[in-house]
């Protein structure tokens, strides 16, 4: 959508520029400081943005089709700064945790909500600017995924015995195959196959997590997670086992349900893992030297 200055918008609509500035100020969309107009939260939510001109400096801009009659209220909304204040962390860290959750992504000029989160979260959560993310309900502060992610990131999370037992109850694979094989980067994994996969990722400088819990309502852990492109890797190694096959089916259905990026590997891939895994990663624009 084309963005135009307030003066240009006034001209397009045959309104006196001073009158339009006064109207937008009265609506609480803009304010003046040091002889310079700035946007408020409400102004950003209405669709406004701050642009810069080499000759005239920063200025307020609006979508050319903006409805100036609409009523906007930022009451009850939270910015990354306010969310961070609740958890006693900076807005920069807050954005990184929101990115890790897959709720926001960075584009030129700032952060935006991801398509996935717009489908998955409460429709009251909203975004109306490249530079300021506003969540339209304080329920976000009680979101279990956000709380857990920040607690882990800040070193304040310890998985309880009950949580571990709950997962093991559903997944006896963990009991049968303890994480006892050490990888090149120091991870302990449960099989030679996982060891080879982990070593491949480490040797090629690909940031990865092992057995990361997915941010979904169901209890599920992936084999590997690549945060750069939000890719999950699963190695299926005991397909002749009925319980394992059932577990595999459930996991595949959950990956499909949430439309997650998934790379699947099996025993036959191990014979030529370097080429096969490299090819699968290239499909997600991760190059392997």
Image: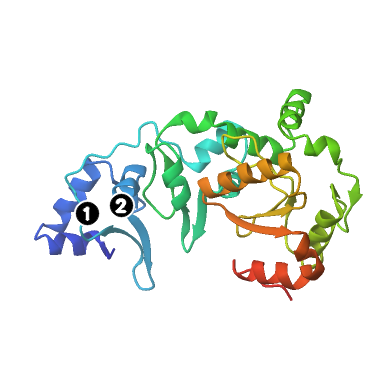
Residue 92 in view, yes or no: no
What residue is rendered at 79% in x and 71% in y?
272
Residue lying furthest top in this view?
162
What residue is rendered at 51% in x and 45% in y?
257
Q: Which residue is mark 1?
A: 66
Color scheme of the displayed model: rainbow
Task: Determine the secondary structure under disc 1.
Answer: loop
Residue 119 appears at what percent x and percent y?
A: 42, 45
Q: Is residue 190 left or right of residue 72?
A: right
Q: CA distance from mark 2 to mark 1?
A: 7 Å
Residue 163 appears at what percent x and percent y?
A: 72, 27
Task: Determine the secondary structure under disc 2.
Answer: loop
What residue is rendered at 73% in x and 55% in y?
208
| Dot label at residue 152 | none
Dot 2 and dot 1 residues touching (CB under 8 Å): yes
Q: Which residue is mark 2?
A: 47
Question: Is tag 2's residue or tag 1's residue first in the polypeptide sequence?
Answer: 2
Looking at the picture, tell me which residue is in the foreground, 130 or 32: 130
Residue 200 appears at what percent x and percent y?
A: 80, 64
Mark 1 residue crowding within 10 angstroms, few (<14) / some (14–19) / many (20+): few
Residue 48 in view, yes or no: yes
């Amino acid at each position: 959508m084309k963005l135009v200055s307030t003066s240009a918008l006034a001209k397009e609509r045959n309104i006196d520029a001073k009158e339009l500035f006064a109207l937008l100020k009265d609506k609480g969309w803009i304010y003046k400081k040091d002889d310079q107009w700035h946007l408020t939260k409400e102004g950003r939510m209405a669709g406004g943005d701050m642009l810069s001109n080499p000759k005239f400096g920063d200025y307020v801009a609006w979508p050319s089709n903006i409805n100036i009659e609409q009523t906007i209220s930022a009451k009850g909304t939270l910015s990354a700064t306010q969310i961070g204040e609740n958890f006693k962390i900076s807005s920069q860290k807050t954005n990184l945790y929101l990115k890790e959750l897959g709720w926001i992504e960075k584009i030129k000029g700032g952060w935006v909500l991801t398509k996935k989160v717009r489908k998955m979260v409460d429709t009251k959560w909203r975004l109306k600017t490249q530079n300021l993310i506003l969540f339209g309900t304080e329920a976000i502060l009680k979101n279990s995924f956000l709380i857990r992610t920040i607690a882990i990131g800040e070193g304040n999370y310890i998985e309880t015995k009950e949580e571990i037992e709950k997962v093991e109850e559903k997944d006896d694979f963990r009991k049968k195959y303890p994480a006892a094989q050490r990888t090149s980067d120091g991870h302990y994994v449960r099989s030679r196959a996982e060891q080879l996969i982990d070593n491949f990722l480490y040797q090629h400088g690909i940031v990865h997590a092992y057995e990361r819990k997915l941010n979904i309502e169901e209890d599920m852990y992936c084999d590997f997670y690549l945060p750069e492109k939000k890719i999950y890797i699963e190695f299926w190694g005991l397909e002749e086992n009925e319980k394992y096959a059932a577990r595999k089916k459930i996991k595949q259905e959950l990956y499909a349900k949430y439309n997650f990026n998934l790379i699947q590997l099996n025993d036959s891939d191990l014979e030529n893992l370097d080429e096969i895994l490299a090819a699968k990663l290239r499909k997600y624009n991760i190059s392997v030297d």
